[in-house]
Image: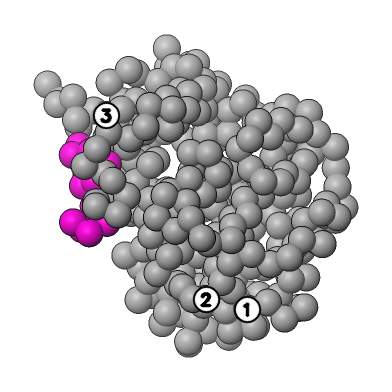
């Protein structure tokens, strides 16, 4: 018989990326350029830029927003969810030795992402010598967190800084649970939910920690909309340890609903995709 932990871990890592997009295919209208308030805003010390992972329009608009700021003289480090933090040496090697983004992708990229969507951002970093920083947990570390809890991958000082010895506030944990359960079509086995909440929070805390490590340099985070939320995501954890940082979170969303999740939103046309819940429904 497979153990509860092993079953939970295998299911967590096997769930298709498309399922994570469930609930995102609501109304919106196409935009040909980033919203004016995004283009006109001052550069903060930390700019959190979200994404619906497969929304092509969102990637284009986010790149355009970043390009205009960089071409105007801003020189932030770019922390990317798409690179696992253990691969930072590879990222550094690629950035020093590669002439174009395709080379970086070939040196560093794993199989989890549609890398051509990230090509323009990586190329922008190469062209303007902006540090590329790996921000995500590896699958191995995520498995440790599912098994051992949210503080499993952190050193004692980080556990103290982020108060991980105490229970995470119920409002944060409950909101994460709602996002994870609805994002998996309300069909997630109950035994998996706690571990997945811990893994999501660990990713957020690691991204916050890595962003802080770049100080005094300004930072842009490229990550999914769930991670850039200011109420429960990276923005929340940054404010716990660095409240003086100027920060702005931007959701690139397929709806007009902000609900206090972001400082600003860029509304996108829904990406055409199959029902992301179809595969799970077949398995029931």
> Which element type, helix, strand or loop, lies under badge 3?
helix
Q: Is residue 107 visible?
A: no
Q: Position of residue 151 (x, y in %)?
A: 24, 46
Tell me if mark 3 has few (under 14), some (14-19) or many (20+) residues whose alpha carbon lies within 10 angstroms of its own. Answer: many
Nearer the observer: mark 2 or 1; the answer is: 2
For marks 2 and 3 on the same chain, the one whose residue lies earlier in the sequence: 3
Q: Depth check: 168 or 5 in front?
A: 168
Residue at image location 18% in from the left, 24% down from the top: 4
Identify the disc placed on residue 75.
Answer: 1
Q: Is residue 153 magenta?
A: yes
Identify the disc placed on residue 217.
Answer: 2
Q: Depth check: 86 or 211 in front?
A: 211
Residue at image location 63% in from the left, 54% down from the top: 248
The outermost residue toward the front is 244
Q: Position of residue 57 (x, y in %)?
A: 76, 49
Q: Is residue 18 above or below residue 182?
A: below
Identify the disc placed on residue 8.
Answer: 3
Distance between the alpha carbons at the discs numbered 2 and 1: 8 Å
For marks 2 and 1 on the same chain, the one whose residue lies earlier in the sequence: 1
Q: Report if the CB atoms under discs 2 and 1 are less than 8 Å apart.
A: yes
Residues drawn in magenta: 147-158
């Amino acid at each position: 018989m497979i153990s509860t932990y092993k079953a939970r871990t295998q299911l967590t890592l096997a769930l298709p990326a498309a399922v994570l997009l469930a609930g995102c295919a609501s109304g919106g209208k196409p935009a040909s350029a980033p919203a004016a308030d995004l283009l006109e805003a001052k550069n903060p010390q930390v700019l959190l830029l979200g994404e619906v992972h497969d929304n092509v329009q969102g990637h284009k608009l986010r790149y355009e927003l970043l390009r205009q700021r960089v071409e105007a003289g801003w020189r932030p480090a770019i922390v990317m969810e798409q690179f696992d933090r253990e691969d930072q040496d590879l990222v550094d090697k690629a950035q020093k030795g590669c002439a174009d983004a395709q080379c970086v992708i070939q040196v560093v990229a794993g199989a989890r992402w549609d890398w051509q969507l990230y090509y323009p951002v990586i190329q922008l970093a190469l062209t303007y010598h902006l540090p590329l920083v790996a921000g995500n947990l590896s699958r191995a570390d995520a498995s440790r967190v599912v098994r051992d809890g949210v503080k499993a991958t952190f050193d004692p000082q980080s556990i103290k800084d982020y108060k991980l010895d105490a229970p995470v506030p119920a409002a944060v944990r409950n909101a994460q649970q709602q996002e994870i359960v609805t994002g998996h079509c309300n069909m997630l086995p109950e035994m998996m939910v706690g571990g997945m909440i811990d893994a999501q929070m660990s990713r957020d805390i690691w991204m916050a920690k890595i962003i802080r490590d770049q100080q005094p340099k300004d930072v842009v985070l490229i990550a999914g909309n769930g991670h850039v939320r200011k109420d429960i995501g990276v923005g929340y954890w940054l404010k716990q340890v660095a409240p003086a940082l100027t920060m702005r979170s931007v959701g690139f969303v397929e709806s007009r609903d902000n609900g206090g999740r972001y400082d600003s939103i860029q509304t996108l046309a829904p990406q055409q995709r199959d029902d992301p819940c179809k595969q799970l429904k077949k398995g029931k």
